[in-house]
C-alpha cells in the first residue's frame, strides 16, 4: 500500500497481538506491492495491467492449493490457510488497482463509493476475519469506516492526485459548486472550493460517526485500534477545516500533538 493512499490504515499497529503481525504483514505486502504496480514507476498501462493479472493468477494458485511461485505469495498462502481468510477481498483490491490504471475521474459519488468498496473495505474485512469478528453487522460498519478513511485520504491528497492526473472528487460535485479542473490545476481555493470541500467533509464525517460504534463493540486490542483509526480520520477532517480546506499549500497530516489528542479521545469514546 502506498504511503499516501493508505497512511490512515491502520494507525495503531503497535496494538496488534504478536501472533497476528505476520498475517498483517503478509496482507500489507500484497496490497502495497500491487498498489505500487498500479501507481509507481514508468511502466505502460499495458505492463501494469499484465503485472496485476499475474497477481490474480497467483491468487488462483492459492485457491487451487498449488505451490506459490514467489515468497510474497507463499507467505500469503500460509496466512490464508491458517486463518481461513476469504480470497474475495484480495481480488477486490486487485480490481481497484487495475481501475487506477485506466480510470482517473469519477462521475458521481456512487461510482467513487464503488471504488472505495474495492480499494479500502477489503482491508477491514480481512482484519475482522483475523480477529474472528466478521459478523454481518461488524462488516457493514467496517465497510463504512474504511470507505470514510479512503475518502478522507482523497480529500487531503487532492494536490498529490492531481499531479498523477487524477481527480477523486466526484465530477457532479465539482459542477454543483462551480469548481473546474483548471481551478485545481492553479490551486485556487476560492469560496466555491471551500463550499465544495465543506460539503465533502460533512458527508464523510457523518459516515464515520454513524459507523464508529463498531469500535466500542469490538473487544480488546482490535477495539482500541479501531478507536484510534476512527479518531485519526476525524482529526484529519478537523485539520482540513483548520486550514480552511487549502489542501494545495497546507496538506493536513497527523503530528505528535495530534497523537496525544487521539489517545485522549479514544479513551473517552462512548
Image (cartoon, helix red, strand yellow):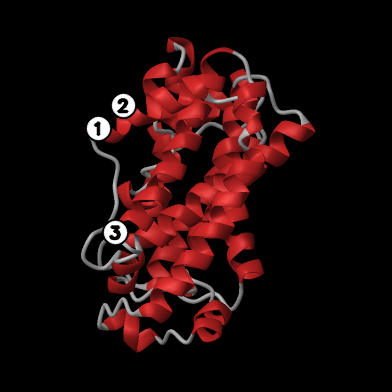
Residue topped by disc 3: 243
According to the picture, the residue beneath numbered tag 2 turns out to be: 260
Quarter of the C terminus within the rendering: top right
In front of the other: 200 or 91: 200
Q: Is residue 228 above or below residue 168?
A: above
Cα–Cα span, label 2 and label 1: 5 Å
**Within 10 angstroms of label 1, few (less than 14), some, or many (20 or more) residues?**
few
**Quick check: can you spot residue 19?**
yes
Callout 2: few (<14), some (14-19), or many (20+) C-alpha neighbours within 10 Å? few
Identify the element where label 3 is drawn.
loop
Q: Which residue is mark 1?
A: 257
Q: Nearer the viewer, residue 143 or 191?
A: 191
Q: Is residue 253 left or right of residue 200?
A: left
Marks 1/3: CA–CA distance:
17 Å
Of 56 and 207, nearer the camera is 207
Percent across and percent down for residue 3 are 31, 47
Q: Is residue 210 left or right of residue 56?
A: right
The correct choice, above or below, for 120 with respect to 256 in the image is below
Q: Are marks 2 and 1 in contact (CB under 8 Å)?
A: yes
In primary-sequence order, the first of circles 2 and 3 is 3
Label 1 or label 3, whichever comes before in sequence order: 3
In the rendered image, residue 213, in percent from the top left (x then y), is placed at 65, 31
Q: Residue at x 29, y 41 (%)?
A: 254
Q: Secondary structure at mark 2?
A: helix
Q: Residue at x 49, y 76 (%)?
A: 105
- In this orientation, does residue 91 appear? no
Q: CA distance from mark 2 to mark 3?
A: 20 Å
Q: Which residue sits at x=34%, y=50%?
A: 239
Q: Are marks 1 and 3 in contact (CB under 8 Å)?
A: no
Vertical relation: 225 (above or below) 164: above
Amino acid at each position: 500500500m502506498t504511503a499516501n493512499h493508505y497512511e490512515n490504515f491502520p494507525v495503531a499497529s503497535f496494538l496488534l497481538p504478536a501472533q497476528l503481525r505476520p498475517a498483517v504483514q503478509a496482507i500489507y505486502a500484497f496490497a502495497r506491492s500491487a498498489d505500487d504496480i498500479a501507481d509507481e514507476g514508468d511502466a505502460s498501462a499495458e505492463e501494469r495491467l499484465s503485472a496485476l493479472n499475474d497477481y490474480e493468477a497467483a491468487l488462483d494458485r492459492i485457491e487451487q492449493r498449488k505451490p506459490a511461485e514467489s515468497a510474497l505469495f507463499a507467505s500469503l498462502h500460509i496466512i490464508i490457510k491458517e486463518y481461513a481468510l476469504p480470497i474475495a477481498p484480495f481480488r477486490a483490491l486487485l480490481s481497484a488497482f487495475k481501475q487506477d490504471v485506466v480510470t482517473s475521474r469519477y462521475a458521481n459519488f456512487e461510482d467513487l463509493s464503488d471504488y472505495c468498496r474495492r480499494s479500502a473495505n477489503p482491508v477491514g474485512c480481512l482484519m475482522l476475519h483475523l480477529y474472528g469478528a466478521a459478523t454481518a453487522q461488524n462488516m457493514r460498519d467496517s465497510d463504512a469506516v474504511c470507505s470514510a478513511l479512503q475518502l478522507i485520504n482523497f480529500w487531503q491528497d487532492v494536490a498529490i492526485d492531481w499531479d498523477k492526473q487524477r481527480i477523486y472528487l466526484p465530477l457532479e460535485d465539482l459542477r454543483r459548486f462551480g469548481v473546474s479542473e483548471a481551478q485545481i490545476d492553479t490551486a485556487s481555493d476560492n469560496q466555491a472550493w471551500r463550499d465544495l470541500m465543506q460539503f465533502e467533509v460533512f458527508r464523510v464525517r457523518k459516515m464515520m460517526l454513524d459507523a464508529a460504534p463498531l469500535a466500542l463493540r469490538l473487544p480488546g486490542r482490535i477495539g482500541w485500534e479501531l478507536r484510534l483509526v476512527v479518531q485519526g480520520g476525524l482529526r484529519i477532517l478537523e485539520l482540513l477545516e483548520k486550514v480552511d480546506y487549502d489542501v494545495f499549500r497546507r496538506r493536513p497530516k497527523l503530528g505528535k500533538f495530534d497523537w496525544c489528542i487521539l489517545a485522549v479521545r479514544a479513551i473517552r469514546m462512548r
